[in-house]
Amino acid sequence: MVSVALTMNVLAVTQDEAQATALETRFRRRLGSALTFEHLRSGTRALERLSRESADVVICARETEDVPGLTVLQRVRRDRDTAVVLLDRDALSQLLPSRFDAVLEATAEPADVLDAAYSLLAADGFFDDAARPFHGAFPGSSGRDVKVSGTLEGLTPFDMVLSLTQKRTSGRLYLLLGDVEAQLAFQQGRFVHAEYQQLTGEDAVIKIFLEAELHPNIEFFFEPCSMCLPPGGATLHTSVQEVLLKVALELDRHRLQAGQ
């Protein structure tokens, strides 16, 4: 696995010790020593703690030792922009989730909580803003200054592409699919180039996303650059939404064929 070039501060608020342990185990399997994990039983104490020190992600159970999880989410939302995963599907009748929070079942699997947390952080640019230098651990990456690196566990290539375009990012995203390196390039938020083996442009994007379904633990690294076009110029000339729509349709077609 490529070293993870970010740190994540997670606060779990639940009375259930087993639930807290399972969540920490799942997050630590993904982040290792890059994870800071704190468990509190009290929602009130969690809010006091957040008033002194921020967290990247708050995971809150339906019931805490003293206040409902919904109350914690509403207080966090009022005071700060922090990603919150609330484990209380019934709360959807009382609030409309914002881009900073996700609502799951009370008994959601730790892997689903991890997925939700990563999706919230990706949408808010966490993986862009939490950048650290990284050198040489990815095949062919020697000498590159890599902004973010790791695996796409908890994220999909769709998540990464949308996040990089929404943040008007300039850089190259490299994906290791099996033992083949794929490249996606972005220029000020425009998706301008894709390359996979001998393929470029939309053909390469489709092939990359098809291969990604066969390699769930994709290693990646992101290399910032001011001018990311290949020597021959852009190979993608339509909006990212159009490109991803074509990819989604092609993936559906392949899935239907595989199911026959």
Image (cartoon, rainbow, N blue to C red):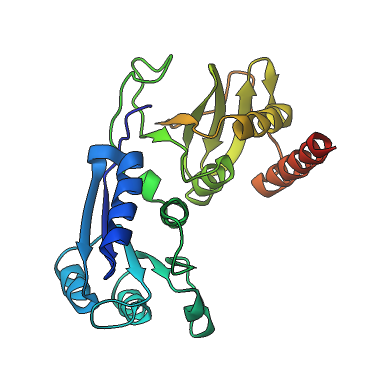
Q: Residue at x 70, y 37 (%)?
A: 237
In-front residue for pair 49/134: 49
Q: Which quarter of the picture shows residue 151?
A: top left
Q: Residue at x 77, y 39 (%)?
A: 250
Query: Residue 95: in sight, yes or no?
Result: yes
Quadrant the N terminus occupies: top left
Would you place residue 27 above or below residue 81 in this image?
above
Q: Residue furthest front?
A: 18
The foreground one among 47 and 61 is 61
Q: Is residue 119 above or below residue 252?
A: below
Q: Position of residue 223 (x, y in %)?
A: 41, 29
Q: Is residue 82 visible?
A: no
Q: Nearer the viewer, residue 234 or 220?
A: 220
Residue 6 coordinates in the image, percent (x, y): 29, 41
Task: Give percent across and percent down for residue 50.
Answer: 20, 69
The structure residue drawn at horizontal position 30% and vertical position 71%, both measured from the top left corner, is: 80
- Residue 141 lies, with reference to residue 254, above or below; the image says above
